[in-house]
């Protein structure tokens, strides 16, 4: 649980403490767009206390990877939404800035912001539908690092994601008496195309889904992995089909600390080297055009191989 530090701006500093009473109905998420080292929550608090360079601006909270600074009470309005003096964003929403400093852990800062938002939602009875990006009010490309993965960010607030949007649980053991039950047990659909993919891995050619072929496939699956699994992906390109930003890693891991970067939809790696098991899921071992090795999810839900 991150520490919340109340460091309220003096009421006399009206450019940063307008003081209009407010009953918050929205939560507005921003990104600082400041990648400088040291540009953490404390630094942004000092920035506001020092007059914000003459700007008329203030938000309620700044969140980094370690702590949260609160600048004004939540029952007072801020100037952060860019929708005017009487705008709903400015007059009815709590503003939250997420730090992007290069010497901080942005993923951790995001998690801290999600924790804060969930807390504020409960305190002020604000529904998830009213958690919005800055862009909602003014059209500004903010928060720039979250807009392409906004649904994933919201899912994290609701507890629908555990660690990464690209982690998929898989099972390797047949536990039920039919191929349909098996596919359902590992969270995959029981469609013909799914059975056909498994049949190809087990060397069953011309698969048409007949009762005999299903029985043969089930018996082979019961015996374990195929002795020579088809590795048609080796040497091929893998690219993201995820609507948000898909994480890739510098080692086989799902951990935030091993995130090497993000892939937009349609971007990927030119060469798949291998497929490895990571926890309860799988990742492709890949290399980029310079020969650098990375790891990205092998889930068909998030990537495609060409």
Image (tube, rainbow, N blue to C red):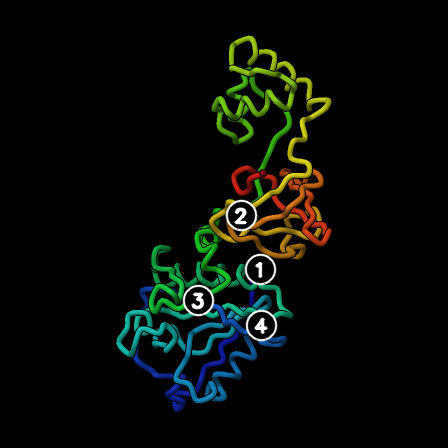
Q: Which residue is mark 4?
A: 35
* Sequence-wise first label, 1 or 2: 1
Vertical side of 190 occupied by 244: above or below: below
Q: CA distance from mark 4 to mark 2?
A: 24 Å
Q: How far from the left and from the top, in percent, is residue 185?
A: 54, 27
Report which quarter residue 23 is drawn in. bottom left
Q: Residue furthest left?
A: 86
C-alpha separation, residue under disc 2 versus residue under disc 3: 21 Å
* Mark 3 element type: loop
- Tag of residue 107: 1
Viewer-closest of 273 and 7: 273
Which marked residue is nearer to the observer: mark 3 or mark 1? 3
Mark 1: secondary structure: helix
The answer to whether residue 4 is visible is no
- State which tag comes first along the sequence, 2 or 3: 3
Closer-to-camera residue (19/178) = 178
Front tag of 2 and 3 = 3
What residue would you read off at disc 3? Answer: 142
Q: Decide if residue 52 is on the left or right side of residue 295.
A: left
**Marks 2,3: beta carbons within 8 A:** no
In this orientation, does residue 280 appear?
Answer: yes
């Amino acid at each position: 649980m991150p520490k919340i530090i109340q460091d309220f701006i003096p009421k006399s500093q009206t450019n940063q403490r307008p003081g209009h009473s407010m009953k918050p109905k929205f939560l507005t998420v921003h990104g600082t767009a400041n990648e400088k080292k040291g540009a953490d929550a404390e630094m942004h608090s000092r920035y506001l206390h020092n007059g914000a360079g003459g700007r008329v601006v203030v938000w309620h909270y700044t969140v980094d990877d370690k702590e949260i600074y609160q600048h004004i009470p939540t029952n007072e309005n801020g100037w952060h939404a860019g929708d005017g003096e009487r705008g709903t964003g400015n007059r009815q929403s709590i503003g939250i800035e997420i730090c992007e400093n290069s010497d901080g852990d942005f993923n951790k800062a995001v998690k801290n912001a999600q924790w804060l938002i969930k807390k504020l939602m409960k305190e002020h009875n604000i529904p998830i539908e009213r958690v919005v990006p800055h862009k909602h009010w003014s059209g500004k490309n903010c928060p720039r690092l979250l807009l392409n993965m906004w649904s994933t960010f919201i899912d994290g607030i609701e507890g629908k994601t555990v660690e990464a949007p690209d982690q998929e649980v898989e099972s390797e053991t047949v536990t039920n008496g039919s191929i349909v039950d098996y596919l359902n047990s590992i969270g995959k659909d029981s469609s013909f195309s799914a059975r056909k993919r498994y049949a190809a891995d087990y060397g069953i050619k011309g698969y048409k889904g007949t009762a005999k072929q299903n029985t043969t496939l089930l018996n082979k699956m019961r015996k374990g992995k195929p002795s020579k699994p088809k590795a048609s992906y080796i040497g091929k390109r893998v690219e993201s089909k995820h609507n948000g930003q898909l994480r890739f890693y510098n080692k086989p891991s799902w951990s935030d600390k091993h995130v090497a970067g993000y892939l937009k939809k349609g971007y990927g790696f030119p060469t798949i080297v291998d497929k490895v098991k990571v926890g309860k899921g799988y990742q492709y071992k890949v290399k980029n055009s310079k020969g650098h090795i990375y790891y990205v999810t092998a889930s068909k839900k998030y990537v495609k191989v060409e």
